[in-house]
Structures are given as structure tokens and as C-alpha cells.
Image (spheres, helix red, strand yellow):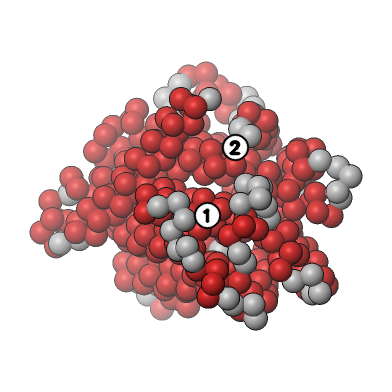
């Protein structure tokens, strides 16, 4: 037993790994859109989204404990809904995941436009996407050192922005608190939850953590609390220091653009934050394209198809093919979706459908009812369904308007 545990990681390391998985570039794209659509009350949207993710994450960790197998969404959903629905669930996750990456390419283009104003943000986003696809096809993965640099840039951007904004706190920026009405707070949760996705990666640690049945749920709780506090301070500092009018100028206003208006005499710090945010976003897209390609290769293995099996045997279904598939889907989303808000909506529909179908499996386990574990599951399902319903409503409204 001692030899076996020696090759595993403890709770502290699991928390660090989990935080690396959770803290990503999504927080930078989410905050501007949330502030422009909800106003100061966006902090309430974030708190509701955090509450939802808390219970979804606990339920997801429980499912990972009961079925510690490869395939997560497919494996869990198959327990109660069968092969076909399980395929749809896993496909929905990949769909939402790739739309989120296309959104980050849009955000990267907007941020790069500040550095290269003579080139349109659309072209810069396309160039970013093309270069990252080429790098991944060539097998240029981020090294372990690169991953540490990436998380350092992300944390620096969050902390530097928070500290800078705290020097300009103005309580007048809190009024009116709900300029778009109470319903805007509920609708804002579909954007707020975007920055919290990534917790599902922590459940993959079950096979390498000491006493996983206790430590993985604890790691999830500690990660969510720490990341939740960091994000809360980040969003709160922006709301308190930057007037709503700055964000309502355009839905594509970036955090650096907002900071430049409020801190015209701190150009060096703003440029440094801009560079860090760009590095974090581009590094995240680079890493996630590779992860997405692995998901896609694994996903197609789940199909019971002779021609897919033949493609594997002939060597057509490779990592590089998965990268190209990711690139094509991201490119289509990038070119066809112009509304930033629609990216958040479609991402939520895909990811939340996958989470809902996955954790529903717990409701079909008698021991979960006897132990009381399903109280968390029900709360997670209720909150997830609320945000999922809001996203569906938003999609229908946008479709009718268009």
C-alpha cells in the first residue's frame, strides 16, 4: 500500500492541479459581457452561477467515484439512458467546448486589435486560429514549463487588474444596481457560468489521488472556493471602479480597453496586463485544441461503426485528424456567429446538456437516495436546468429576432 501511495498525489497537489484546470481565459471574456448586459447586479448573477456549479461539481465527482472509467459523460449517461443518448451527451460537451474555443479566438482578435489597430479584429482572430491549428498539427504542445507560465500569466492578469481597480473604487458605480431589471440578473447567469467551467477536469484525478473517495470531493470544494473568491474579487473590483457606460459602448469592449479609459496615466501597467491576458487566452486556446482533439478521437471510438473501426485500423483517425476536425468546427463557428452573447448561449446549451444527462445517472442509484447524496444532485440539476432553460429561451429569442 505504501508503494502504491508513493506514486500518487495528495490533496494539496490535487487542489493545485484543479485550480490550473479551472482558472482560464474565460473570466476575461465573460466579465465584459456580463457587466454590459446586467450592470452592477452582475455580481448576483455570478453568485447564482457559482451556487449552480458547486452542486453540479459535487454530483459530477460522485459519478466519477461510482464509475471510474474513461469517457465520463458517455459512461455516466449510458448508465440510465443507453448508448445513443450517451453519444449525444458526449457530443454535446464537445460541441459546447469547441464553441467556447471559437469565442476565445474572437476575444483574442479583439485584444490583438489594440496592439495592431491597422488590422481588423476579425482577421486577427482568424490568423490566431489558423496559427494555433498549424502548431497543434505539427505536434507543438505546451511543455510542463509552458503550462506553469500560462497559469502565471492568467493569475497575474487577475491579480494586477484587481489591485489596480481597487485603487479607483467609487460606490457611485453601483447605482443603478439593476439598470436592466431583476430578470437581467437571471439571464446573466448564462454568461457568468462560462468562467467557471473546467471543474470537470478534476474528476479525472480519481486514479492518481490518495484516498480519492475523500480527497477528490475535497479538492473540488477547495478549488471552487479559492477560484470563486479570486473571481469574486476580480468581478467586484471591476464593477466598483469602471462605470457601466464604458462597457455599454460595444459588446466587444475588452478589459484592457476599459482599463485604458479609467487609468490613462498607468499605460505601462495596462500594457503589461494586456500582454498577460493575450498570453493567457492564446495559451489556453493552444492547450484546449490539443485536449479537444483527444476528446474527439476518444469520442469516435465510442461509435459502433465498422467504417470508423476501419479508419482507425488504417491510421486515419489520428491526433492530427482530431486537431483538424477541431479547427474546422471552430472556423465555422467563428465565421457564422457574429453575436458575442450567442457564443455564451450555445456553449451553455452544449455543456449543460452534457452535465445534466451525466449526473441524472445518480438518481437511478438506490444507495444514493438512502445516503442522502441525491439532495446535492437534485440541487445541481435544478440550478443547471434553470440556466439551461434561460439559454434555450435566449437562443429562441435571437432566432426569432433574426
Give the CA separation, mark 2 to mark 1: 14 Å
Residue drawn at 73 percent across, 59 percent down: 257
Horizontal and vertical percent for residue 144? Answer: 68, 64
Q: Is residue 25 left or right of residue 382?
A: right
Q: Secondary structure at mark 1?
A: helix
Q: Which residue is mark 1?
A: 34
Task: Say above or below: 2 vs 337.
Answer: below
Q: Earlier in the sequence, mark 2 or mark 1?
A: 1
1 or 320, which is in the foreground? 320
Q: Quadrant for the N terminus, please.
A: bottom left
20 or 123, which is in the foreground? 123
Task: Say above or below: 330 vs 236.
Answer: above
Q: Which residue is mark 2?
A: 339
Crowd class of label 2 (few under 14; some 14 to 19; many from 20; radius 10 Å) = few
Horizontal and vertical percent for residue 269? Answer: 78, 73
For residue 85, what is the image quadrant? top left
Residue drawn at 52 percent across, 54 percent down: 34
Amino acid at each position: 500500500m505504501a508503494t502504491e501511495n508513493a506514486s500518487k498525489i495528495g490533496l494539496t497537489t490535487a487542489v493545485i492541479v484543479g485550480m490550473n484546470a479551472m482558472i482560464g481565459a474565460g473570466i476575461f471574456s465573460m466579465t465584459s459581457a456580463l457587466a454590459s448586459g446586467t450592470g452592477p447586479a452582475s455580481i448576483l448573477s455570478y453568485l447564482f452561477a457559482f451556487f449552480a456549479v458547486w452542486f453540479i461539481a459535487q454530483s459530477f465527482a460522485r459519478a466519477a467515484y461510482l464509475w471510474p472509467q474513461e469517457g465520463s459523460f458517455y459512461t455516466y449517461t449510458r448508465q440510465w439512458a443507453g448508448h445513443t443518448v450517451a453519444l449525444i451527451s458526449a457530443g454535446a460537451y464537445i460541441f459546447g467546448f469547441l464553441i467556447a474555443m471559437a469565442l476565445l479566438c474572437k476575444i483574442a482578435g479583439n485584444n490583438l486589435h489594440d496592439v495592431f489597430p491597422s488590422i481588423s479584429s476579425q482577421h486577427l482572430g482568424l490568423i490566431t486560429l489558423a496559427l494555433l491549428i498549424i502548431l497543434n498539427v505539427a505536434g507543438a504542445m505546451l511543455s510542463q514549463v509552458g503550462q506553469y507560465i500560462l497559469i502565471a500569466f492568467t493569475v497575474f492578469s487577475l491579480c494586477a487588474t484587481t489591485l489596480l481597480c481597487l485603487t479607483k473604487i467609487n460606490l457611485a458605480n453601483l447605482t443603478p444596481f439593476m439598470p436592466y431589471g431583476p430578470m437581467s440578473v437571471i439571464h446573466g447567469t448564462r454568461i457568468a457560468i462560462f468562467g467557471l467551467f473546467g471543474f470537470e477536469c478534476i474528476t479525472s484525478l480519481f486514479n492518481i489521488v490518495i484516498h480519492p473517495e475523500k480527497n477528490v470531493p475535497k479538492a473540488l470544494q477547495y478549488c471552487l472556493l479559492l477560484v470563486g473568491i479570486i473571481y469574486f474579487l476580480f468581478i467586484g473590483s471591476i464593477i466598483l471602479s469602471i462605470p457601466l457606460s464604458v462597457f455599454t459602448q460595444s459588446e466587444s469592449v475588452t478589459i484592457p480597453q476599459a482599463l485604458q479609459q479609467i487609468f490613462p496615466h498607468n499605460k505601462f501597467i495596462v500594457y503589461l496586463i494586456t500582454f498577460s491576458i493575450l498570453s493567457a487566452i492564446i495559451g489556453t486556446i493552444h492547450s484546449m485544441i490539443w485536449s479537444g482533439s483527444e476528446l474527439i478521437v476518444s469520442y469516435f471510438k465510442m461509435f459502433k461503426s465498422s467504417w470508423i473501426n476501419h479508419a482507425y485500423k488504417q491510421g486515419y483517425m489520428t491526433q492530427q485528424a482530431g486537431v483538424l476536425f477541431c479547427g474546422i468546427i471552430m472556423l465555422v463557428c467563428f465565421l457564422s456567429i457574429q453575436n458575442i452573447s450567442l457564443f455564451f448561449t450555445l456553449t451553455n446549451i452544449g455543456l449543460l446538456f452534457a452535465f445534466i444527462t451525466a449526473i441524472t445517472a445518480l438518481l437511478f442509484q438506490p444507495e444514493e437516495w438512502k445516503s442522502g447524496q441525491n439532495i446535492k444532485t437534485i440541487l445541481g440539476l435544478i440550478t443547471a436546468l434553470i440556466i439551461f432553460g434561460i439559454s434555450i429561451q435566449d437562443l429562441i429569442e435571437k432566432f426569432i429576432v433574426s
